[in-house]
Image (tube, grey):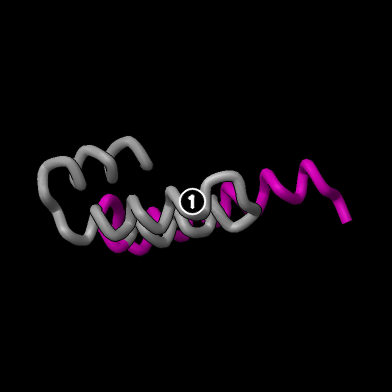
Amino acid sequence: MFRRIDELANEGDGIAQGARTTLERAKGTVTYEEKLITQAKKCELFDNYEEKCLRFARDTRSKCAHPT
């Protein structure tokens, strides 16, 4: 997703340029994945259903890695 945002930003897309800046600041933090999903949605890389699927997959992975 970041690669596609970067491509859009290089093509002059203002929303993607802002998204890239936000993601570069968040790189290496615990909030990066959440920001990546949010920013990709703003860039219209996927619809609401796909956003829910991505969040579900991320949450499922996190639960498997860190069972409660």
- Taking the spot 54% from the left edge, 52% from the top edge, the residue there is 32
Q: Does residue 54 belong to the magenta stretch? A: yes
- Taking the spot 35% from the left edge, 63% from the top edge, the residue there is 48
Residue 34 left/right relative to 68: left
Give above or below for 20 relative to 14: above
What secondary structure predominates along the stretch shown in magenta?
helix
Q: Does residue 63 belong to the magenta stretch? A: yes
Residue 51 left/right relative to 34: left
Question: Residue 60: x, y in percent?
Answer: 67, 49
Question: Residue 25: x, y in percent?
Answer: 47, 54
Q: For the residue labelled by badge 1, is the local secondary structure a helix, a strand or a loop?
A: helix
Residue 14 left/right relative to 65: left
Magenta segment boundaries in residue numbering: 42-68
- Which quarter shows the N terminus? top left
In this view, the residue in front, 52 or 35, is 35
Mark 1 residue type: Leu
Residue bearing the label numbered 1: 54
Question: Residue 8: x, y in percent?
Answer: 19, 44
**Residue closest to the far right:** 68
- Which quarter shows the C terminus? bottom right
Tally the marks.
1
- Taking the spot 24% from the left edge, 54% from the top edge, the residue there is 16
**Few, some or many C-alpha atoms within 10 Å of disc 1 (few <14, some 14-19, many ≥20)?**
some
Picture quadrant of residue 2: top left
- Taking the spot 48% from the left edge, 51% from the top edge, the residue there is 54
Question: Residue 50: x, y in percent?
Answer: 38, 54
